[in-house]
Image: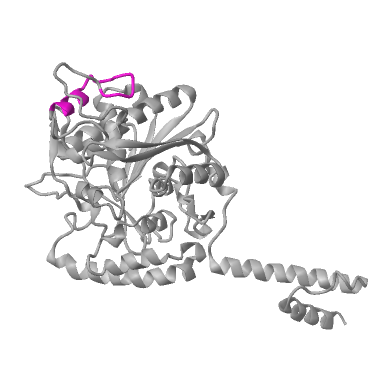
Amino acid sequence: MCMMASKLAYENDKVVKNIVDLHWKMHFVDFYNCWNDYQKENCTQVFIMCDKPKDANLILISFRGTEPFDADDWITDFDYSWYEIPKLGKVHMGFLEALGLGNRVEASTFYANLRANCNSKDNKPPKLNGYKELTPMGKRTAYYTVRSKLKDLLREHVNAKFVVTGHSLGGALAILFPTVLVLHEEEEIMKRLLGVYTFGQPRIGNRQLGTYMQARLEKPESKYFRVVYCNDLVPRLPYDNKTFLYKHFGECLYFNSLYVEKNVKEEPNKNYFGWRFLVPEFLNAVWELVRSFMMGYIYGPGYKECWESVMLRIVGLAIPGLSDHSPVDYVNSKNGNGRRPQGEVDETANRKFRSTSEVRSMSHTGGRHNHPTTENRRPVQPATSANVCDDRVRSKVRPNSALLHRHVRRRRRVLRSRRCLKAFVSGDATAAEPRCRNDRRVCKMNNESAT
């Protein structure tokens, strides 16, 4: 569910509302297009949804990620500048600007927005003496807009908890949002945080920041899960070395090119570049291109990749790891196409996916809901207030297995042939008329045996 919400965030507000309300049968709250001080335009997009309009149990916040053909978004991912916050650590400056928490042209804006006691009650940045207003009039910023709306929703739905998610740049904003909530001492909001799920997320700060947030997101249990697919380039940026000092934190759920999951502290080849990884990365890109033509035959038509995805994989032959950043592989990973290594027990499966039945993730492809086959599903915690979407998703299950489809068709033919035989014995010629060539063949065999 979280991955599909992250993927849906790339669409416009009308598409998001249509999918959430009509296909997912949930409640669309609002879609925001907020001001980004780094790019000087409204390009930080986020939408909010609930599992139901009244007495909701789940509130989901999804940030949009890096646009594939937007050079400014990619520059933000490759930016290495940081701003140091006392007691918190060094934070990626471009991500702070994307949330509307400052501007590198006027450094005092970061101080105004990132003070430890900054808990403004409205959705506008606080003002200090000497603070220069750089955000254009009428422009709203992502952090204060989402925080204000979240407070209203939590007051309206007293039993609700919230989840924050995002893919790529959206994943960085998804973990940075609760980080600033902790800094602003929004304890009432943080008590109702159910989890943060990011996919292909770049690094957002240094080791000190990771230590600070782990102490607040892992008690009494871990609430932050970072999903990385294979050779994805973006999670390996900015560099983790003695020069740049960026570090990942939180639990890493790593999927290889066979969609087999492993719980690791850090993804392999953490800085992407290296001679000993060059050949394996290229061979893996070749395998993924070949696999893209087979997915529809192996797992069903819902997994067939479009020509844009295939073209991206061809480009990935020149830049291995680029095509791995596509949401397609993250959707397939969370749909459970792969298996865990033999003998390895997923002791944290119920804890990781307790929020909204992620193992039954809904794939929006032309309005269809695609699901993994029954044998590939991971164990899920029994339905509680935290996974209120389970019954709704389960009611829409359409297995994709071609083998299962053949079995269903064969079973239908057998049932129709039995009805034909029964009608023939009773003398009802109209009801006994077969509907297709296969039914005629089966009916003929049954009639001969009856005679």
* Residue at the farthest left position: 243
- Residue at horizontal 76%, vertical 69%? 416
Is 75 rendered above or below residue 98?
below
Q: Quadrant of residue 146?
A: top left
- Residue at horizontal 79%, vertical 74%? 434
Start and end of the magenta stretch? Answer: 108-125
74 to the left or right of 405: left
Q: Quadrant of residue 139?
A: top left
Is 146 rendered above or below residue 301?
above
Would residue 75 be counted in the magenta stretch? no
- Residue at horizontal 49%, vertical 25%? 157
Residue 447 lies, in percent from the top left, at 83, 80
Q: Would residue 434 be seen by someone viewing this image from the given angle?
A: yes
7 to the left or right of 325: right
Q: Quadrant of residue 327?
A: bottom left
Quadrant of the snapshot with the C terminus: bottom right
Residue 195 lies, in percent from the top left, at 37, 37
**Front position in the image: 65 or 396:** 65
- Residue at horizontal 20%, vertical 25%? 133
Q: Would residue 266 be seen by someone viewing this image from the given angle?
A: no
Residue 22 lies, in percent from the top left, at 56, 44
Residue 65 lies, in percent from the top left, at 32, 47
